Image (cartoon, helix red, strand yellow):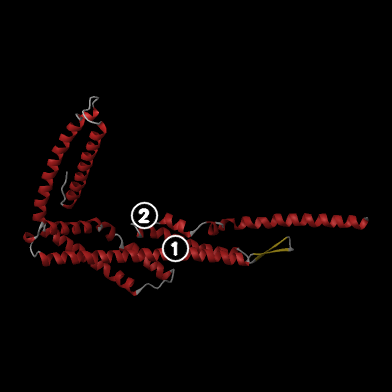
Amino acid sequence: MEELQELQEMREELNSRIVSVNRDAEEILLDLQPYSYLWKEEPDSVIKSLTANPEDALGNVPQIIEQIRNCETLRTQITENVQTFRLVKEWLRVDQANFKDHLLSCVDDWQKRFKDLVLESVCRCLYDLDAFCTDTETELNETVTSAPTTEQMDSATLLKVITRIQAVQDRRTTTDDMFKPLASAIKFLKTECYEELDAQVQVLQQSLPEQWLHTKKLSEQWRQQISTPMAKEASCVRMQVTSFSSKQIQFRELFRKSSAFHRDCPMPAVDMLDKLRKDIQALQEEVQELTKSGKLFEVRN
């Protein structure tokens, strides 16, 4: 009986130690909780939040670079702070080697995705600007061949030239301010990420500032050359705007007096309302065209 009692006490002592060591072992999870987002979240969700405005590719780059640097800091923290094993109560060994390797692999994966995103943004900006400058210069130079003087230029050609000039004007500020952050991003990729850029990317980085300057000068030359026909077209647009204003006033009066809003409507009200809807839609489309023409020919209100 005494032996059984002793065994029972040993059993209770062992159970007590197991419960206690389990409790301490579970506290290890709390130490690892700050890294839980690495396996709970996907890089795609973070990338999506960082690229909310895809049209402004370089505008997102500083935030992405910050994420890359955070990944490097996090990698150092994991390497130094997460041990390959932990000894609990001096007798329970918790092996963390595989988990530590998995954490580092997750960090590397996140970091690579962010690096690829910076590289993609840089390449997209360079290729997009190169294509824009090439297309603009090609189209404007072809116009010289087809219409050596502005007097020989028909309305369609004039509109094409003005559209190109306006496109250059629309992206002037954005592109002028693009080269400095672009150079910073490329320097970051080379010096901190040790990325070897394609030869074409390096060539574009060197040549595009001058090419963009040439495109702006060519656009300005054309703006001066077509100033006379532009003034004529602008005058026509003003006349169209005046005519539209009168038409709009007339329609407003007709709309207010429409039988569709009277109790004794001579025809089904739904038909009359549908006709009014179509008339309004036609006026809206005309406004859009006038707005577009007014912008192209620089017509001010």
Measuring from the top left, give residue 268's x and y in whole percent: 25, 31
Work out which quarter of the rendered image holds the N terminus and state it: bottom right
Q: Nearer the viewer, residue 259 or 145?
A: 259
Measuring from the top left, give residue 242's x and y in whole percent: 12, 41
Identify the amino acid type marked 2. Answer: Asn
Which residue was labeled with disc 2?
Answer: 53
Which residue of the protein is positioned furthest toward the right in this rendering?
A: 1
Q: Give neighbour class at mark 1: few <14, some 14-19, many 20+ (Cα, 10 Å).
A: many
Measuring from the top left, give residue 154's x and y in whole percent: 10, 58
The mark total stands at 2
Question: Element under label 2?
Answer: loop
Question: Element under label 1?
Answer: helix
Which residue of the protein is positioned furthest toward the front in this rendering?
A: 267
Q: Residue at x 23, y 65 (%)?
A: 133
Identify the amino acid type marked 1. Answer: Phe
Work out which quarter of the rendered image holds the C terminus and state it: top left
Q: Residue at x 10, y 44 (%)?
A: 239
> Which label belongs to residue 114?
1
